[in-house]
Structure formats: C-alpha cells, structure tokens
Amino acid sequence: QVQLVESGGGLVQAGGSLRLSCAASGFTFSTYHMAWFRQAPGKEREFVGFISRSAGSTSYADSVKGRFTVSRDNAKKTAFLQMNNLKPEDTAIYYCSAGVTDYNPALTYQYDYWGQGTQVTVSS
C-alpha cells in the first residue's frame, strides 16, 4: 500500500539545522510532485515547500525562503527538507505529501498522499 514516512525531526536550538526525510513506497515516486507542509498547535496546516517530479522546479513559503531547501532522490524514492537557521516559530509537525498536479502547490487538496508527520521543536 501507499506509504510516506517522515523522519529526522527532533529538538534543536534556534539557529540550528535539521534535515527531514520522506521515504515513499507503494506508488511511482518519480511521477509525483512532492511538498512539505507544517502544522503548529492551534493553527491550520500551512505550505512550506514544493518540488516538481523531475526536481526542475521548486517553490517556498515566504516565511522559509532562503532558509529551507526541498530536494528529492527519485532513485531512492525519498524527498528531503533541509532546514537551516531554525527559529522558534518553525516549531510544528512537518508532513510530506505527494500529488500529480502542480496548479497551486500551496493547496493541500492537490495532494493525494500524506505522511504521518514528524515533530520539529525549536527552542529559543
């Protein structure tokens, strides 16, 4: 069955870095666009970053631009989110998602598959 499994979350001090991974199985990874979202307590799920199926196109939320980088390895069926210069406001559960359309990468309903999430906590 389809699975997206995130890993790499944890507790880090402000200014630190983390690299999240999203391992995919059960579908043809290279034909799906991938995205990362996050959800903080009491807030709606928000878009973080997107990478196209071929990795030829990326986009980011303004709040993370210049600090976060989305990448993928189609041979290993894995997507990554490199997070640098982390801030306390980056604290959230981070989810990866997969979808076949890229009309507006920030829209959650465009994605067919979701992982279970990984917690990222940034202390000040």
Image (cartoon, rainbow, N blue to C red):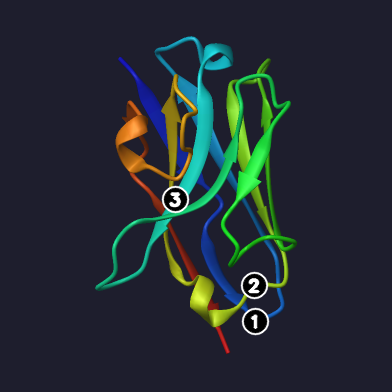
Q: Is residue 8 left or right of residue 113?
A: right
Q: Please name the residue shown 33% across and 26% down the image.
A: 112
Residue 54 screen position, x and y as percent: 68, 19
Q: Looking at the image, is mark 2 or mark 3 earlier in the sequence?
A: 3
29 w.r.t. 70: above or below: above
Residue in front for this viewpoint, 10 or 124: 124
Residue type, numbered disc 3: Phe
Residue type, numbered disc 2: Leu
Q: Name the residue under label 1.
A: 14
Q: Please name the residue shown 34% across and 19% down the image.
A: 2
- Which image quarter: residue 30? top right
Q: Which mark is residue 86?
A: 2
83 w.r.t. 74: above or below: below
Residue 101 screen position, x and y as percent: 45, 22
- Which image quarter: residue 46? bottom left
Residue 45 screen position, x and y as percent: 33, 57
Residue 60 screen position, x and y as percent: 61, 51
Residue type, numbered disc 1: Ala
Residue in front for this viewpoint, 76 or 50: 50
Q: Looking at the image, is mark 3 or mark 1 earlier in the sequence?
A: 1
Q: Mark 3 points at which residue?
A: 37
